């Protein structure tokens, strides 16, 4: 990542040009590959796309991935890699989380965490649904690849990968939901934070790809 996208609005002081994953340990990257450093007080903001590619419906599949290098994550802390909604911006609803890939501190390790809100129904409001991977990795200041895939409205749970190895997981908050579509609106998507920049949700470390 040699620079920030022109469409990004910047909060704080993210740093570009820092060394990212590179050969020979990571042969798929260029020898001069660079990454983005976030200091726990910085993040990037993007407007929703006009073509609605980010607006998920029941039956749509979503895959999210990143290379991460974590320098600090406490047990119980949940930091955002990328998420749409739940920005806290004026005019948006609280907990309007369309989807999010997060990292959660659990049992001394870093877990992949997927979060979204189900759409409101005439007889009941939507709620947040959170899924956490069973496997994790240490807060070791090394590069790790994380990914998650989920089909909204499916009876199959998400699948996550950590450093190329698949892992199952469990739903906790809100439980699993098979029939409800995800909540969708025109709120922004952010890289590295949510909830108005809440420090507890803001990424601290390096991101790439």
Image: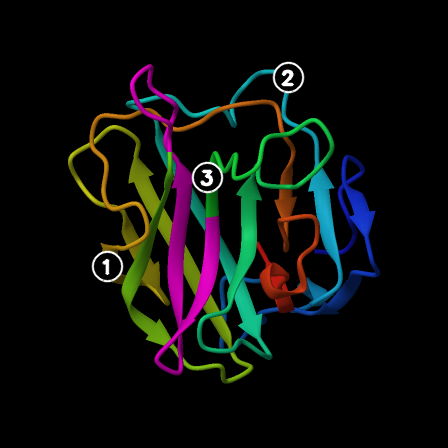
Horizontal side of 128 relative to 26 (left or right) equals: left
Locate residue 179: give its quadrant: top left
Task: Calculate the distance from the C-alpha at mark 2 to the C-alpha at mark 1.
Answer: 34 Å
Disc tally is 3
Label 1, secondary structure: give it.
strand
**Image location of residue 158, percent across then percent down:** 27, 46
Q: Give the magenta part as a residue range.
A: 101-126
Label 3, secondary structure: give it.
strand
Query: At 79% from the left edge and 64% from the top edge, which residue is drawn?
Result: 15
Q: Is residue 81 magenta?
A: no
Please tell me whether residue 118 is drawn above or below residue 123 in the rendered image: below
- For disc 2, the marked residue is 50
**Image location of residue 32, percent across then percent down:** 70, 67
Query: At 31% from the left edge and 40% from the top edge, which residue is drawn?
Result: 150
Please tell me whether residue 161 is drawn above or below residue 99 in the rendered image: below
Binning the other alpha carbons within 10 Å of mark 1 as few (below 14), some (14 to 19) or many (20 upward) gives some
Locate residue 60: give its quadrant: top left
Q: Are the residues at dot 3 and dot 2 in contact (C-beta closer than 8 Å)?
A: no
Binning the other alpha carbons within 10 Å of mark 2 as few (below 14), some (14 to 19) or many (20 upward) gives few
Along the line of sight, the residue nearer the viewer: 114 or 195? 195
Along the line of sight, the residue nearer the viewer: 26 or 64? 64
Task: Calculate the distance from the C-alpha at mark 3 to the C-alpha at mark 1.
Answer: 17 Å
Task: Calculate the distance from the C-alpha at mark 3 to the C-alpha at mark 2.
Answer: 18 Å
**Numbered badge on residue 169:** 1
Of all residues shown, which one is farthest toward the front? 123
- For disc 3, the marked residue is 99
Please tell me whether residue 68 is drawn above or below residue 175 in the rendered image: below
Quadrant in which the C terminus is drawn: bottom right
Quadrant in which the N terminus is drawn: bottom right
Sequence-earlier tag: 3 or 2: 2
Locate residue 118: give its quadrant: top left
């Amino acid at each position: 990542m040699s620079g920030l996208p022109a469409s990004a609005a910047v909060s704080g002081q993210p740093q570009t040009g820092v060394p990212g994953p590179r050969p020979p340990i990571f042969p798929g990257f260029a020898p001069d590959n660079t990454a983005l450093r976030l200091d726990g007080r910085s993040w990037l903001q993007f407007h929703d796309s006009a073509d609605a590619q980010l607006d998920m419906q029941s039956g749509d599949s979503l895959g999210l991935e990143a290379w991460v290098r974590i320098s600090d994550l406490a047990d119980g802390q949940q930091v955002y890699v990328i998420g749409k909604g739940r920005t806290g911006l004026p005019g948006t609803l609280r907990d309007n989380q369309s989807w999010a890939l997060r990292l959660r501190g659990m049992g001394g390790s870093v877990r992949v965490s997927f979060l979204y809100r189900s759409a409101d129904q005439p007889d009941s409001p939507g709620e947040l649904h959170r899924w956490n991977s069973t496997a994790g990795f240490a807060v070791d200041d090394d590069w790790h690849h994380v990914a998650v895939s989920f089909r909204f409205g499916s009876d199959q749970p998400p699948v996550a990968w950590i450093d190329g190895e698949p892992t199952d997981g469990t739903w906790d908050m809100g439980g699993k939901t098979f029939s409800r579509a995800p909540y969708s609106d025109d709120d922004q998507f952010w890289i590295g934070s949510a909830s108005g920049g809440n420090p507890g949700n803001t990424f601290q470390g390096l991101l790439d790809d």
